[in-house]
């Protein structure tokens, strides 16, 4: 039998502490090892007992929950903190996560919600590194050790010039599959106004890219480690802002600097882009090693893809930089996959078959296709095959590079912005 989950309850109200204790008393694998009524007491008890989980009230006299969490994260790195608060706005969430909290419960909460949060945080402990470990040099939350950081991680941008083509589905399943293959991978939701990654992975938007933007002068692996969230698959997730207007906080320079840092930490940086070709999206495509161009078997989709290929030639992308993917492929469609390849004069690296029932269920349940019921169906097998293709191609490119051959396809120097470069050409 596994060891009990040792829990410390921290709240300035005795009745609240007792209510929480009662919610846990019938869980055979959970042991309440103590209660604290102040932040100061919580710090001392955490140092003395090193609990697995600390349930921390955010509003307390003296040292509040945020301050206590920061100190405990430094001094007792093995203890994982779940913040409890009657406040649930995004500012509280960000402050809690930056202080070292791993989950957030809004009062009042029920027993099922409480024990689910405790077990979820406890189960994810090996993948989460506290700030003390980050400062010591092991950036486990960012998936890498500072001393052995990846200097040439691979960047893949998943893009479609037509919205609704399934880019997020492709990006999520690719990131999760790479993580399951033991690669250090981060998925960036760069659809900044209306990103769907959080919903499709059933994740709370506790931290997101705006938390990096607000501290760009501190940009380093430690900051990245406090902002990315860890999916249960092991993939790390950098979410888009929770509200559309917050996207205005993010500039092209912010995004480029962030992705450059991510490349130094992860083996793979998967970017789910917007279909809107603004400066930020174009700079991400420009800096990507490969672009996974997603289309469907319809004339509007193919028209837009054809225009994008014209754009890629104007931007002088290498011919193998853009990988064409057919999503929701079907033999019943009016334009065959073979005809699409002939029309566009481009090879199709993968066709992901249509399966609306599985795809919709995966999105609604927040479970990637390759992790749920669809993993053994044609749609899931195609997504896994795509992962194998990506791994093989980059492995071969790395081998060629070691032999002194130039395998880079990222292509373009920064000459004053993508649009300026594009329209300055004849």
Image (spheres, grey):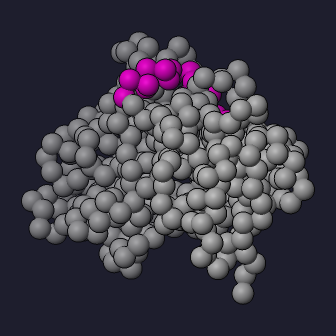
Q: Position of residue 151 (x, y in %)?
A: 74, 43
Give the main secondary structure, helix, strand or loop, of the magenta stretch. Answer: helix
**Which one is nearer the viewer's eye here, 342 or 349?**
349
Residue lying at the far bottom in this picture: please name it: 1
Quarter of the picture containing the C terminus is top left
Magenta stretch encompasses residue 257: yes
Q: Is residue 359 above or below residue 283?
A: below
Task: Find out whether residue 317 is within the magenta segment.
Answer: no
| Horizontal relation, residue 333 to residue 264: left or right | left
- Say above or below: 112 vs 245: below
Q: Which residues are magenta?
A: 244-264
Q: Quadrant of residue 420?
A: top left
Residue in the foreground of this view, choosing between 364 and 352: 364
Residue 178 visible in the displayed image: no
**Residue 369 place in picture, x, y as percent:** 39, 67
Residue nearest the observer in this picture, 179 or 86: 86
Location of residue 91 by image quarter: top right
The answer to whether residue 251 is visible is yes
Residue at the far front: name it.
15
Q: Position of residue 412 (x, y in %)?
A: 54, 28
- Rendering coords of residue 216 (x, y %): 65, 23
202 w.r.t. 85: above or below: below
Q: Quadrant of the N terminus?
A: bottom right
Q: Residue furthest left?
A: 334
Q: Residue at x 77, y 65 (%)?
A: 33
| For residue 66, above or below residue 56 | above
């Amino acid at each position: 039998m596994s060891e009990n989950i040792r829990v410390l309850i921290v709240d300035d109200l005795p009745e609240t502490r007792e209510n929480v204790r009662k919610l846990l008393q019938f869980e055979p694998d959970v042991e309440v090892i103590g209660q604290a009524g102040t932040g100061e007491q919580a710090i001392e008890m955490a140092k003395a007992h090193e609990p697995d989980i600390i349930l921390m009230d955010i509003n307390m006299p003296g040292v509040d929950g945020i301050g206590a969490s920061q100190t405990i994260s430094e001094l007792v790195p093995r203890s994982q903190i779940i913040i409890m608060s009657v406040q649930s706005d995004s500012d509280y969430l960000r402050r809690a996560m930056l202080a070292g909290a791993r989950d957030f419960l809004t009062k009042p909460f029920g027993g099922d919600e409480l024990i689910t949060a405790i077990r979820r945080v406890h189960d994810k402990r090996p993948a989460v590194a506290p700030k003390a470990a980050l400062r010591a040099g092991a950036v486990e939350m960012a998936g890498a050790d500072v001393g052995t950081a990846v200097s040439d991680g691979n960047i893949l941008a998943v893009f479609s010039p037509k919205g609704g083509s399934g880019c997020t589905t492709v990006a999520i399943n690719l990131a999760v599959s790479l993580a399951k293959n033991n690669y250090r991978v981060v998925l960036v939701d760069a659809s900044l106004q209306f990103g769907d990654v959080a919903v499709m992975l059933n994740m709370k938007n506790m931290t997101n890219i705006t938390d990096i933007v607000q501290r760009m002068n501190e940009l380093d692996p430690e900051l990245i480690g406090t902002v990315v969230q860890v999916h249960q698959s092991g993939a790390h997730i950098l979410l888009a802002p929770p509200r559309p207007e917050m996207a205005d906080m993010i500039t092209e320079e912010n995004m480029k600097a962030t992705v450059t840092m991510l490349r130094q930490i992860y083996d793979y940086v998967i970017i789910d882009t917007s279909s809107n070709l603004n400066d930020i999206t174009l700079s991400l495509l420009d800096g990507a090693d490969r672009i996974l161009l997603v289309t469907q078997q319809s004339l509007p989709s193919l028209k837009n893809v054809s225009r994008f290929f014209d754009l890629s030639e104007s931007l002088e992308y290498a011919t193998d930089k853009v990988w064409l993917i057919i999503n929701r492929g079907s033999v019943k469609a009016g334009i065959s996959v073979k005809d699409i390849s002939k029309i566009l004069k481009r090879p199709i690296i993968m066709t992901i078959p249509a399966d609306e029932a599985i795809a919709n269920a995966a999105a609604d349940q927040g479970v990637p296709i390759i992790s749920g019921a669809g993993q053994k169906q044609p749609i899931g097998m195609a997504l896994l095959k795509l992962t194998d293709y990506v791994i093989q191609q980059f492995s071969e490119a790395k081998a060629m590079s070691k032999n002194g051959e130039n395998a880079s396809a990222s292509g373009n120097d920064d000459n004053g912005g993508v649009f300026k470069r594009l329209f300055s050409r004849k």
